[in-house]
């Protein structure tokens, strides 16, 4: 079982607005391990929820977004950005991130490694090699779509994103944690995810209402 505190519990941020007159908000972000600053970077938009620490193979990282149209990975040991998406027009703008930690799925009390009911394929997962990002395509509407992040090769400077779930509008809520909106599970090696999503319907007929209708 991974140790606690989790990276999400351990690392925090200190955000200072650096907006210039007549421009949109920008920020400088210091990453804190307790009271110690372990990394810092600038972001060319407001912070939103674009900091998500996670662990993989005994090392800690964080999903960040220095550029508002790309996802990057920060190594929390070295303080260096080790992977970034390539920028291109019409890119996906991150608003928030989530990397499921082992403790998000397990309580650590009902089973232990080596016990009769311990199943490594399920009970030793997740391991920090995937995550989620929600946001919008530049110029899209104001709802947040959720996409998949392949983090398995971040040590090699590679991060991959895809929209395998289709056009899903995540029902974000500032009072809820990402793990309340995105719930992962595994049974006999089959991985599943349940999303809290937004849909609108005609109250009389029950028919779905297209997004372009108000």
Image (cartoon, rainbow, N blue to C red):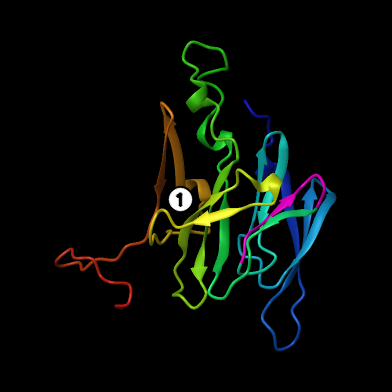
Residues in magenta? 70-79
* Farthest residue, direction bottom: 22
Reply yes or no: does residue 78 show up in magenta: yes
Residue 49 image-quadrant placement: bottom right
Residue 38 horizontal/vertical position (percent): 83, 50
Residue 177 seen by the camera = no
Which of the two residues, 194 or 59, is positioned nearer the viewer here? 59
* Farthest residue, direction left: 205
The answer to whether 78 appears left or right of 96 in the picture is right
Q: Residue at x 55, y 45 (%)?
A: 130
Q: Residue at x 48, y 27 (%)?
A: 122
Q: Assign the magenta stretch its main secondary structure.
A: loop
Residue 16 horizontal/vertical position (percent): 77, 68
The answer to whether 111 appears left or right of 81 in the picture is left
* Farthest residue, direction right: 36
Q: Residue at x 66, y 66 (%)?
A: 47
Report the number of numbered marks.
1
In the rendered view, would you say 101 is above or below 136?
above
The answer to whether 12 appears left or right of 191 in the picture is right
* Farthest residue, direction top: 116
Q: Residue at x 20, y 66 (%)?
A: 203
Q: Secondary structure at mark 1?
A: helix
Residue 35 seen by the camera = yes
Disc 1 crowd rating (10 Å Cα; few below 14, some 14-19, many 20+) is some
Q: Where, quadrant-wise, is the N terminus in this rendering?
A: top right
Q: Where, quadrant-wise, is the C terminus in this rendering?
A: bottom left
Residue 14 horizontal/vertical position (percent): 76, 59
The answer to whether 186 appears left or right of 10 in the picture is left
Reply yes or no: does residue 135 show up in magenta: no
Residue 173 horizontal/vertical position (percent): 48, 59
What residue would you read off at disc 1?
A: 181
């Amino acid at each position: 079982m991974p140790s606690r505190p989790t990276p999400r519990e351990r690392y925090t941020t200190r955000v200072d607005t650096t907006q210039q007159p007549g421009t949109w908000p920008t920020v400088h972000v210091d990453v804190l391990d307790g009271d110690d600053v372990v990394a810092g970077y600038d972001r060319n938009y407001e912070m939103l929820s674009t900091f998500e620490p996670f662990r993989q193979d005994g090392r800690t990282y964080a999903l960040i977004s220095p550029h508002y149209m790309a996802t990057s990975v920060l190594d929390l040991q070295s303080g260096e950005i080790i992977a970034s998406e390539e920028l291109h027009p019409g890119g996906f703008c991150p608003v928030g991130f989530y990397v499921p930690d082992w403790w998000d799925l397990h309580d650590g009390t009902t089973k232990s490694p080596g016990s009769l009911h311990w199943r490594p394929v399920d009970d030793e997962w997740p391991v920090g090699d995937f995550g989620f990002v929600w946001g919008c395509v530049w110029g899209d509407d104001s709802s947040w779509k959720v996409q998949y992040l392949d983090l398995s090769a971040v040590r090699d400077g590679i991060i991959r994103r895809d929209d395998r779930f289709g056009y899903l509008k995540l029902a974000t809520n500032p009072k809820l944690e990402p793990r309340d909106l995105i719930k992962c599970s595994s049974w006999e090696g089959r991985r599943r995810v349940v999303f809290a999503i937004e849909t609108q319907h005609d109250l009389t007929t029950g028919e779905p209402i297209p997004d372009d209708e108000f």
